[in-house]
Each structure stands twice: as structure tokens, then as C-alpha cells.
Amino acid sequence: NSLLKMHTSQLSVIADNFRNMVMTNHGDRLGFFDFGANLEELTFELGSENGDTEATRRIAKTTAKYMPYVSLETFEPFVEKFDNQHTAKVGIRITYKVPRISAEEKSMEVLLYVAGW
């Protein structure tokens, strides 16, 4: 109960670290140029087959390198639109497990907002 939230379980620490890794773009971490999924540059490509495939590949690659204990289960790309049918945000729902700690499946959404519409 302080200014900063502290995790008290390994699964919550891993979930937080995984979310941060997926949302990090290349070059954001000093000394680790290739850390992260680098999804920002795919913002306008998500929702297309090629863009979704590339995002999935990037997430799998960075997970294998930096968090190999995380088992990726599913990727579900989605597109949400404004009332005027212009794309507002795109993203991917990811489900994963950490088999050595729990058989429980966890999920998270990665959202990328599209500007200029």
C-alpha cells in the first residue's frame, strides 16, 4: 500500500515483465537494442494477414530469447473501429502459460492506437 505497486507472486512478476517486453520497441532499452517485440512500426499493418503474421513472429522471437520459460499458446489479432468506421486501434490478444510455475493459462492484450484518421 504505497506509491509503487509491488508483486507478491512469481506469476504476477512474470506477467508484468512479459507485458513490458512485448510493448517495448527496439532501441528503447539501452544496451539491449533487440529487446522487445518492436510492434509500433507494424501499427498500420496489423489487421492484415502479413502484419498479423509478422507481429506473431516478433513476439515469439523475443519471448524465445528473453523469456524462454513462457509458453505462448494463442495469438488473436483484432481491429476496433470508431463510429465512422475508421480504424481506432488494433491489437493482439495473447494467451500464454508458465509451465514450471503453474498450468493456469494467462492472457493479455497488446493495443496499438492508429492516429491520423
Image (cartoon, grey):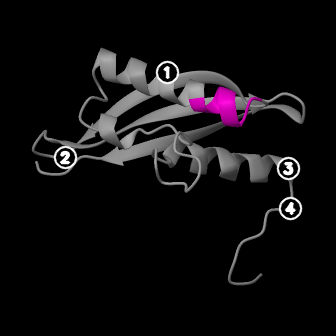
> Mark 1 vs mark 2: which is more N-terminal?
1
Q: Are the residues tagged 2 and 4 within 8 Å (C-beta)?
A: no
- Residue span colored magenta: 62-68
- Name the one closer to the observer, 67 or 100: 67
> Mark 2 vs mark 4: which is more N-terminal?
4
Tell me where residue 30 appears, x and y as whole percent: 55, 56
Which disc number belongs to residue 10?
3
The amino acid type of the residue labelled 1 equals Arg
Tell me where residue 99 appears, x and y as whole percent: 84, 27
Tell me where residue 77 appears, x and y as whole percent: 41, 27
Which disc number belongs to residue 82?
2
> Mark 1 vs mark 4: which is more N-terminal?
4
Residue labelled with disc 1 = 57
User: Would you call the spot at circle 2 few (<14 residues within 10 Å), some (14-19), or many (20 or more)?
Assistant: few
The amino acid type of the residue labelled 3 equals Gln
The amino acid type of the residue labelled 2 equals Phe
Q: Are the residues tagged 4 and 3 within 8 Å (C-beta)?
A: no
